Image (spheres, rainbow, N blue to C red):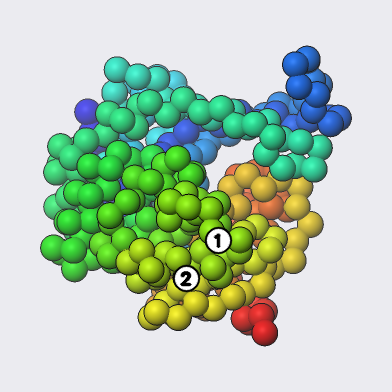
Amino acid sequence: MNDSSDRAGAGVAIFGGAVFDRKYQARARLVPGTSNPVDSSSSHGGVARNIAENLVRLGVPTAFHSIVGADAAGEALVERLRGLGADVGGVVRSSERPTAEYVAVLETDHELALGIADMAIFDLYSEAHLDAVWPRVAQANWILADCNLQTGVLQALARRCEGAGARFAVNTVSGPKAVRLNGLGSAVGLLFTNRDEANTLIGRDIAADPRSAAEALRDCGFAAAVVTDGGNGYAILENGAVSWHQAVEASPVDITGAGDAFVAGTLSRLFAGDGLALAARSGALLAARTTETLESVLPDLSPGFFAGGGRAMPGPAS
């Protein structure tokens, strides 16, 4: 059932995955077919959940909507966000499936070698759950969904946002899940994706860089998008034009959560009134700093993160 006791009226409403993460960092180059020595850790994750935690830590009023199992992992995920100040009244508890779990195996260079995910519980989040929370969601300044949600729920969100005049953003999460947005291009106010996921959404591997991916997304009906490519930079589609931007320099130790930080940093500045290009520079900064920690969310993140010279980022590349 839903917990309706939490505060409402959030500035940003987030819909999507809450996941218990397990991470295994290889001590030596991974060798297939045999046992490999690793250092292990666990944390709270999920694209939407990570975005929500970043936003709350940045001081943005945030409501989180998801589905978790009726188990200890699910309760811990909810209580962490509640303790940080998020509105978690839209989180559904289900006894039909366990809380989602993701296992990441990282190479010695901290790049993802293998990811294993049990996300079946998100198939249980339905339009009926959306109906139950919509009266409190409709007034949000921004509504963001990740593609852990089923196509029907994403379509219903898009219709409702259009009817309410709400600003609707979507994060593709992964290539296989990006295709859930097929046919929704014009209904998505702002798309967050990376080059590979954009290629899957486009339906053909034509985009060799974020700029060409953004151009292809424009041809598919998307009005605004941020297309990232890790340390290689990112492209912005806005008002029919595509611009290319350099990544923020970083000394990465773990890339987990960097994309989610990019989205949250961007949304936080859009909420504050910045334009998309300036907001995305802040997102790039937060993403870079997140790669410099072993945590999925920057541990010392606070509302003052972007103050002063922290937002003085490189402009578009020539």
* Residue 292 on image: x %, y %: 73, 53
Q: Is residue 55 left or right of residue 160?
A: right
**Mark 2 vs 1: CB contact within 8 A:** yes
Q: Residue at x 28, y 55 (%)?
A: 183
Q: Residue furthest bottom?
A: 318
Q: Residue at x 41, y 42 (%)?
A: 177
Q: Residue at x 50, y 72 (%)?
A: 236
- Marks 2/1: CA–CA distance: 9 Å
Query: Residue 246's image quarter?
Result: bottom right
Mark 1 is surrounded, within 10 Å at the Cα level, by few (under 14), some (14 to 19) or many (20 or more) other residues, namely some
Which residue matches tag 2? 215
Quadrant for the C terminus, please: bottom right
Q: Secondary structure at mark 1?
A: loop
**Residue 79 seen anywhere in this rendered image of the structure:** no
Kind of residue sitting beneath label 1: Ala
Quadrant for the N terminus, please: top left
Q: Secondary structure at mark 2?
A: helix
Q: Residue at x 39, y 20 (%)?
A: 98
**Which disc number belongs to residue 154?**
none
Which residue matches tag 1? 207
Establish if 69 lies above or below 178. Answer: above
* Residue 295 on image: x %, y %: 65, 43
* Residue 114 on image: x %, y %: 64, 31
Establish if 131 lies above or below 196. Answer: above
Q: Which tag, 2 or 1, sits closer to the chain's start?
A: 1
Q: Residue furthest top?
A: 34
